[in-house]
C-alpha cells in the first residue's frame, strides 16, 4: 500500500495485534485498539467535512489521542500537521495562516484554541479521556488510495534562527525513513522506546511512531515536558530499552546523577541503546555518559527537511565529537560559498541529497530557492568538515563568525568549555566591540559553583589547553539558564539579540 498509515495499520499491525503499541501515564494501548481508534478518527474527520487532501492541525501532547488523530487523518488521505503543544499563541496564528487547515484538533483551554477561533477555523477539543466516547459510534474510514508522491504530513521547523517554516513530506518519505532507520537501529519487537523529542517534530515522529510501529515494538509517550527526574522515572517504571534524546537532556541527566540527591546510573535499568540528535553531541558529554553509565551514545545528524538523520554513528564506529558517516540511501558533501565541493579537511556548508529530502517549503518559494543548489543539493545551513568519511558539525552558518579575521566554530569552543568540571551548559556567540568581533561564552555554572572572576580565569586557562588563542572567549557571561526551542535546541540568536540590546 502506498498510503503509509494503511501500511502500518492494515498490513503491519494485524501481525501483532495483541502486543502493546503504546504506553502513556500508566495506561496501555494494544495494536488492535490503535487500529480501531485510528479508523474511527478518520471516519470522524470525514464526518466533520475534511476531505482527502485537506489539512488538519494537531496541537496535542504526545498521547493516544495524537497517535490516533495522526494515523486516522493520514489513513483517510488527509494531511496531518502536528505541532509542538508548547509554542506561543503567535506561532499557532502564523501556522493557521500558512497551512490553512480545515480543522484544528486541540487540548481544552489551549492557546491554539483561541488562535483557531480568531482565524475562523473549526476546532475539535480532544484528550485521552474523551477519545473513546467521542469515537464510540463512528463508522471507520476506508483507507484512501494515496500515492507515494502525495503529501503525507506537514512539519513546522523549530525556529533556531527565529524563522519557522512549513515543511511538507510525502508518503514515500515515510517508507524511506522507515527502512533507513530500521537498518541503522535494528529495533526489536521486545524493545520499549522513549524519545524526548515530541511527535510534532520529525525526530519525534520517526522515533515514536515510524520505528516502533513498523516492527511491533512499544513506544512510551510522555505528555509532559522532558525533565531529568521524569525521564529517570520512566526508565524505571516502563523498563525502557531504547532512549532517544538531545544533547541538552543528556547533559541535564548527568548533572542530576552528580547532584547529592541524584539518581544512581543504575536507574537506567534495562536501557541498552542511547541516541542523540538535534544538535552536535559534545565529546565531553559522550565521554562523561560512557564513564557514568557504561553506555555509548549513538549519534545522528539530520533536519526537518530530510525528515530523518542522514549522517550517523554507532558502535564500534563512534568517534567522539563527530557526527559519523553518511547513511544509505543519502549523499552528503561540503561546499564552498559558490556551491563547489571543497577538499577533505576544509570547512564549508554541508549539502545533502536523498529520497526523503523535501522538495521545498509550503507557500514559501523564495525560501525554497535559497536552500537548493542548481544541481538539486539541499543546503543545510550548517558548517562542517569531512575527514576520511567522518563529518564534524561546526555549527549553524548563522552562528559562525570571524574573530581576528579567522573563523570561530561555536561548537568547538563549547566542547572545550563543557569539559570544565564547573560548567553545566554553555553557548558561544560573537560579540561586537566597536569594529572588532570577540568570542563571547554564555555559561551556566553547575549547582553550587560561584560565578565570578575566579571561574572566568579558570575557564580561559582551561580553554587554552585545547583551543587556539583566537578562539578562547574574551567575554564570559553567566546565566541561570539558556534560551531553548521547544525541541531542546539552544537559541543562540536570542543570546546575540539580548547581548546587543543590553
Image (tube, grey):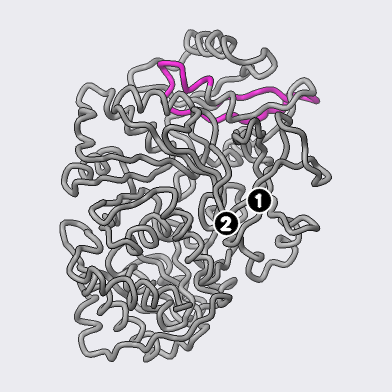
216 in relation to 489, above or below: below
Name the spot of residue 140 as percent of width and height, x first: 30, 88
Name the spot of residue 124 as percent of width and height, x first: 35, 79
* Residue 502 shows in the view: no
Q: Residue at x 83, y 45 (%)?
A: 338
Q: Nearer the viewer, residue 306 or 104?
A: 306
Residues at marks 2 and 1 touching, judged by CB atoms closer than 8 Å = yes
| Crowd tier of the residue under label 2, counting other residues whose Cα lies within 10 Å: few below 14, some 14–19, many 20 or above | many
Residue 144 left/right relative to 460: left
Q: Which mark is residue 376?
A: none
Q: Residue at x 69, y 67 (%)?
A: 364
At mark 2, the secondary structure is: loop
Name the spot of residue 128 as percent of width and height, x first: 23, 69
Residue 252, quarter of the rendered image: top left
* Residue 281 shows in the view: yes
Q: Nearer the viewer, residue 324 or 124?
A: 324
**For mark 1, what is the residue?**
352
**For mark 2, what is the residue?**
306
| Crowd tier of the residue under label 1, counting other residues whose Cα lies within 10 Å: few below 14, some 14–19, many 20 or above | many
Q: Residue at x 16, y 61 (%)?
A: 27
Amino acid at each position: 500500500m502506498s498510503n503509509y498509515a494503511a501500511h502500518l495499520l492494515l498490513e503491519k499491525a494485524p501481525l501483532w495485534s495483541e502486543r502493546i503499541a503504546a504506553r502513556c501515564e500508566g495506561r496501555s494501548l494494544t495494536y488492535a485498539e490503535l487500529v480501531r481508534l485510528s479508523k474511527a478518527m478518520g471516519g470522524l474527520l470525514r464526518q466533520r467535512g475534511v476531505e482527502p487532501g485537506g489539512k488538519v492541525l494537531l496541537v496535542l501532547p504526545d498521547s493516544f489521542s495524537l497517535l490516533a488523530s495522526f494515523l486516522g487523518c493520514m489513513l483517510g488521505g488527509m494531511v496531518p500537521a502536528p505541532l509542538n503543544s508548547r509554542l506561543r499563541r503567535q506561532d499557532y496564528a502564523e501556522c493557521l495562516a500558512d497551512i490553512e487547515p480545515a480543522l484544528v484538533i486541540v487540548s481544552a483551554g489551549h492557546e491554539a484554541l483561541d488562535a483557531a477561533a480568531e482565524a475562523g477555523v473549526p476546532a475539535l477539543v480532544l484528550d485521552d479521556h474523551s477519545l473513546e466516547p467521542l469515537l464510540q459510534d463512528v463508522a471507520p474510514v476506508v483507507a484512501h488510495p494515496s500515492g507515494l508522491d502525495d503529501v503525507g504530513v506537514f512539519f513546522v521547523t523549530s525556529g533556531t534562527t527565529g524563522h519557522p517554516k512549513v515543511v511538507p513530506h510525502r508518503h514515500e518519505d515515510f517508507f524511506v525513513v522507515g527502512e533507513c532507520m530500521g537498518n541503522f537501529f535494528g529495533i526489536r519487537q521486545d524493545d520499549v522506546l522513549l524519545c524526548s523529542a515530541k511527535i510534532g517534530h520529525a525526530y519525534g515522529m520517526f522515533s515514536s511512531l515510524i520505528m516502533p510501529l513498523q516492527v511491533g515494538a512499544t513506544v512510551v509517550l510522555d505528555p509532559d515536558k522532558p525533565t531529568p527526574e521524569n525521564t529517570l522515572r520512566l526508565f524505571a517504571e516502563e523498563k525502557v530499552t531504547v532512549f532517544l534524546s538531545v544533547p541538552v537532556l543528556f547533559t541535564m541527566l548527568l548533572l542530576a546523577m552528580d547532584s547529592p540527591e541524584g539518581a544512581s546510573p543504575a536507574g537506567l535499568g534495562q536501557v541498552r541503546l542511547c541516541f542523540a540528535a538535534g544538535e552536535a553531541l559534545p565529546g565531553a558529554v559522550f565521554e562523561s555518559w560512557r564513564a557514568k553509565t557504561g553506555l555509548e551514545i549513538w549519534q545522528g545528524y539530520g533536519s526537518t527537511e530530510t525528515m530523518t538523520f542522514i549522517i550517523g554513528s554507532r558502535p564500534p564506529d563512534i568517534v567522539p565529537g563527530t557526527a559519523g558517516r553518511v547513511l544509505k540511501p543519502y549523499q552528503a558533501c561540503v561546499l564552498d560559498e559558490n556551491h563547489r565541493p571543497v577538499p577533505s579537511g576544509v570547512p564549508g556548508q554541508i549539502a545533502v541529497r536523498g529520497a526523503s529530502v523535501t522538495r521545498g517549503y509550503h507557500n514559501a518559494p523564495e525560501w525554497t530557492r535559497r536552500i537548493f543548489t542548481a544541481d538539486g543539493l539541499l543546503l543545510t545551513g550548517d558548517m562542517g568538515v569531512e575527514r576520511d568519511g567522518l563529518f564534524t558539525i561546526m555549527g549553524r552558518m548563522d552562528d559562525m563568525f570571524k574573530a581576528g579575521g579567522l573563523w570561530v566554530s561555536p561548537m568547538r569552543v563549547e566542547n572545550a568549555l563543557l569539559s570544565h568540571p564547573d560548567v553545566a551548559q554553555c553557548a558561544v556567540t560573537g560579540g561586537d566591540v566597536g569594529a572588532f568581533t570577540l568570542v563571547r561564552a554564555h555559561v551556566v555554572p553547575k549547582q553550587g559553583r560561584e560565578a565570578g572572576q575566579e571561574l572566568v580565569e579558570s575557564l580561559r586557562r582551561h580553554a587554552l589547553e585545547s583551543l587556539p588563542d583566537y578562539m578562547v572567549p574574551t567575554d564570559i557571561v553567566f546565566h541561570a539558564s539558556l534560551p531553548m526551542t521547544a525541541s531542546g535546541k539552544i537559541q543562540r540568536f536570542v543570546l546575540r539579540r539580548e547581548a546587543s540590546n543590553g
